[in-house]
Amino acid sequence: MDSFQETAVADETLDPPDWAGMGTLSHRILDDAIAYLKEVRERPVWREMPDEVRAFFDAPIPRSPAPVSAVYDDVARNVMAYPMGNIHPRFWAWYMGSSNFTGALGDFLAAIQGSNLGGGNHAAGLMDSQVVNWLKEMVGFPASASGTLVSGGSMANIIGLTVARNVKAGVDVRERGVGAMPKPLRYYASDQVHSCHRKGMEALGLGNRALRRIPTDAGLRVDIAALKAAIAEDREAGFKPACVIGTAGTVNTGAIDDLQALAEVAAGEELWFHVDGCIGALIAVAPENRSLVAGIEQADSIALDPHKLLHAPFEAGCALVRDASQHRNTFAVTPEYLESAPRGLASGEWLFDYGLQTSRGFRALKIWMALKQHGVEKFGRLIDQNIAQARYLTRLIEAEPALELMAPTTVNIVSFRHRLDAASQESLKAFNTEIMLRLQEEGIAALSDTTVHGRHCLRVAIANHRTRRDDLDLLVREMLRVGREIEATMSQA
């Protein structure tokens, strides 16, 4: 008999050794989370991290275990206390959305279940498809259309632009590549188009020059006559016009292109019509303002963001494509290890056939739970509320001689600046930038800045279900106060 005897070693796991203790800590975390949101208005919008907090993130990799309660204490002290601030009612920088508690619970439950939404026969896959179907209905797309949940607007736009490329390439571009196309493709968008479209052109191998930026009118909407002229010019030069990109809410000012006119141009010229609706597509559910995005339902593809106007916790984007077969044919690959089965786990739809990710998170649950709790009509009213707040702020600016509106307010983005007598454009930019930074550093409000018609300005994007009109009153008062303080310092220099 062999004298060797294997020594028994207990198998390791990541499950807690003390489930009761983990339960106690989890209840504490939940209580802290409720207080965190309940008291958000009482905290600064943003604050700078002190040196000792920054130093915490330089610590080396942990090699031995630590009590999970101590791990949570580190998170509470060094992470939760220094957020970006976008859940705060006076966060209006960029265009974020402000999350919601039910959606956060959905994210937690999705992580607990741990499903991979690459597809398959399980409940999370059906919910993913259900949420996509709901989003199709919100923007007026047919039930036969397809869609996929993605990380956000940039990826949703790239999905749409990729389908457009493959449909219009004139060759099997998946097999032969863009170099085999008989004519170089051209895409068209306004000069206000989001920068993700440039990234898309580059990633698709078409190059930045394949995206023609068309001039805009006084309202910063794409000039239809200039678009038609550019298409004719490119055809004459030997290019193949392929896709018109309409913007339903530009990032600078919230301008919405004439989507119905763009749909007519695309149909007449036999071009793909894609709508970047990451800011404004879901205005389609807002009873008072849905007419602003009339024509979006005629698009061949739409990009939208549930983490903006549906306030889902990050990340949650969606790409919708009218022709489901064109969508699937752009991405589907079926290797032998991912073949469908007549029954069992592999008998469900493979959702990764509609995008670039094989591993996909369970993004649908946080959207589904909040929609079930509140109903889509409430989200429509919240969109109308934010647009009304932007118009209110616009009136405050127009009534204040020290402030200047820089672009028309179309939806919930207001572009403006503080005046400075006899100042150059360079001095105005420095002055307004300092106002913006002091408002951030004092924890009062988070604004961003941009350039409109070649002039620097500040930008308030009210995609926030916690904002109230008195927050906007406070913003104007504090801007004027900070402006006076800076001017006083300048006069003493």
Image (cartoon, grey):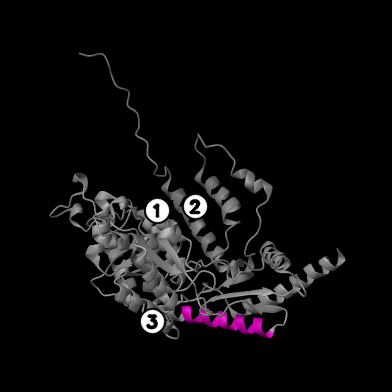
Q: To which residue does mark 2 refer?
A: 25
Determine whether the residue tagged by mark 1 lies in a helix, strand or loop: helix
Magenta part of the chain: 382-399
Position in image of residue 4 (x %, y %): 27, 16
| Mark 3 and mark 1: Cα distance apart in space | 31 Å
Quadrant containing the C terminus in the rendered view? bottom right
User: At x 59% / y 41%, what residue is drawn?
Assistant: 58
User: At x 39% / y 44%, what residue is drawn?
Assistant: 15
Q: Which mark's residue is nearer the viewer, 3 or 1?
A: 1
Instruction: Give the total of numbered labels.
Output: 3
Q: To which residue does mark 1 refer?
A: 203
Determine whether the residue tagged by mark 3 lies in a helix, strand or loop: loop
Closer to us: 433 or 173: 173
Residue type at mark 3: give it: Ala
Closer to us: 2 or 457: 457
Determine whether the residue tagged by mark 2 lies in a helix, strand or loop: helix
